[in-house]
Image: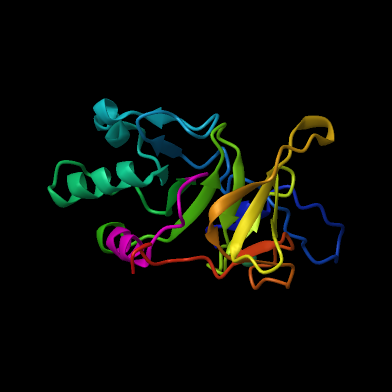
Amino acid sequence: MIFQNLWKGARRGAGEPSTPVFAALPWTSEMTHAQIGSRPSLPDVPWFPPYAWRGLEKFRPRVIAGPRPSLRKLCRHVRAGNLDYSFLDTAVYCLTHVGERPLTNDFRDELWDVFGLPLFELFVGGDGQVLARECEAHDGWHVNESAAEFTKLAGEPHLVMTRKGARGRRFEAMGVGFSGDVTAEPCHCGLENPRLINLPTEELWQ
Ligand SMILES: [Zn+2]
């Protein structure tokens, strides 16, 4: 199972069932991974700006992460035969920044057509903190509870996020700009972190 690394840090004694432990970034340092984009988003993840994509062929990341515009551009390069992407064999991660809406099904389909790899979404703050990430079973986004809390106001469809800082600091709550629900129901993937579900997957104007 390629995502056993999601469970890194799980401690268990002999005979105890393993307890998945949430890791904001779902890959280990042993797995080559890279991020693309006009600027680095994720701390400590090797970054390849657009002018350096040739370097990807040398670095050969098995996992790639990037914001939507960069992934679109990567798709175009691959389709045009400008880039050998055979090194990518594990997953593609789309970085959805605060202020953006979740990925649409159309773009998911496009990425699948090009790469044929599992696609997951990371919801990322401006500081690169992963606030929530798509479930391994594609059943919503698991919340990184050390970084954020999501709630809903009664009668309002939109999710509200409160960022958390060091030493218990909580920042002002803000609407994320899209609808959804928060659930603590058990998840098929085994993680117990709350999940954001019923997220929009269509273009805003549809
Ligand atoms: Zn899950």
Decide if residue 85 is in sight here. Answer: no
In the orientation shown, which residue stands out farthest toward the front?
Answer: 155
**Quadrant, the N terminus:** bottom right
Q: Quadrant of ligand 1?
A: bottom right
Residue drawn where x is 19% and y is 44% of the image: 77
The stretch drawn in magenta includes residue 13: no
- Residue 153, percent across and down? 70, 61
Residue drawn where x is 52% and y is 34% of the image: 42
- Residue 11, percent across and down? 81, 52
The stretch drawn in magenta includes residue 103: yes
- Residue 196, percent across and down? 62, 63
**Quadrant, the C terminus:** bottom left
Looking at the image, residue 152 sits to the left or right of residue 80; the answer is right
Decide if residue 60 is in sight here. Answer: yes
Looking at the image, residue 126 sits to the left or right of residue 13; the answer is left
Task: Point out the stretch of residues depicted in magenta.
Answer: 97-112
In the orientation shown, which residue stands out farthest toward the left?
Answer: 80
Q: Looking at the picture, does residue 50 appear above or below residue 84?
A: above
